Amino acid sequence: MARVYVIQTGRTVWDEQARIESTPGAPLAESGQKDVQDASRELAGLAITTIYASGGQAEQETAALLAGALGVKVRTRKDLRELDYGLWQGLTHEEIRRRQPKLFRQWTEAPGSLRPPGGETLQEAAKRLKAAVKDIRKRHRNGDALIVLRPVARGLVQCLRNGGAVESIWQHADSGCHAEPLDAEPEALNGS
């Protein structure tokens, strides 16, 4: 049976500046490129035949580097994109904390209860990602697949996999550029 793995993108220029990054993204930093190269060596022993990524810059760069090293193809799926942060896109955590202290505190303490101004909720993003993973599992029966995600998107998939609420997002987000299988609790990601 085919396995599905998730991996976080390498660090970006904006990650290094602690800037909020969503749909369009930012390029990989030099350290992020190195992380992806290291990850490609770890993935070499797996039977990965396809890499899935959103159209974001970091996702596409990470997927291209991994695909080149593994000799596989990349498929772009818009539904794998990072959380839409709306008006917070490009701001640093400190800028948000200073400009909107109550919202920032709510975001760090109870993230599931907040919609970033002009963006999407964690629940909306989790629903989108759950449907995408379910579809990839359904379509991908021969050979293993790898899904490249940004930190919060990956954290949401891990929350779903572990059956946890989106409130536990900060325990799972930004776990580095390492692949993890999603088959430990498939019913959590395959249910309706």
Image (spheres, rainbow, N blue to C red):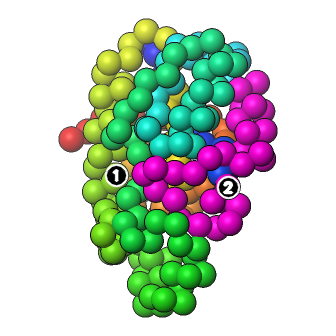
Residue 24 magenta-highlighted: yes
Q: Which mark is residue 13?
A: 2
Can the viewer see residue 153? no
135 relative position to 24: left or right: left
Q: Residue furthest top?
A: 142
42 relative position to 132: left or right: right
Assess disc 1: are there few (<14), some (14-19) or many (≥20) residues with their C-alpha within 10 Å of its C-alpha. many
Residue 14 image point, x, y percent: 63, 59
Residue 145 image point, x, y percent: 49, 22
Looking at numbered disc 1 in the image, what kind of residue is underneath it?
Ala
Question: Image quarter for residue 137?
Answer: top left
Q: Which mark is residue 63?
A: none
Can you tell which of label 2 and label 1 is closer to the viewer?
2
Q: Which residues are magenta?
A: 13-42
Residue 74 image point, x, y percent: 49, 22
- Label 1 sits on a secondary structure element that is helix
Q: Which mark is residue 126?
A: 1
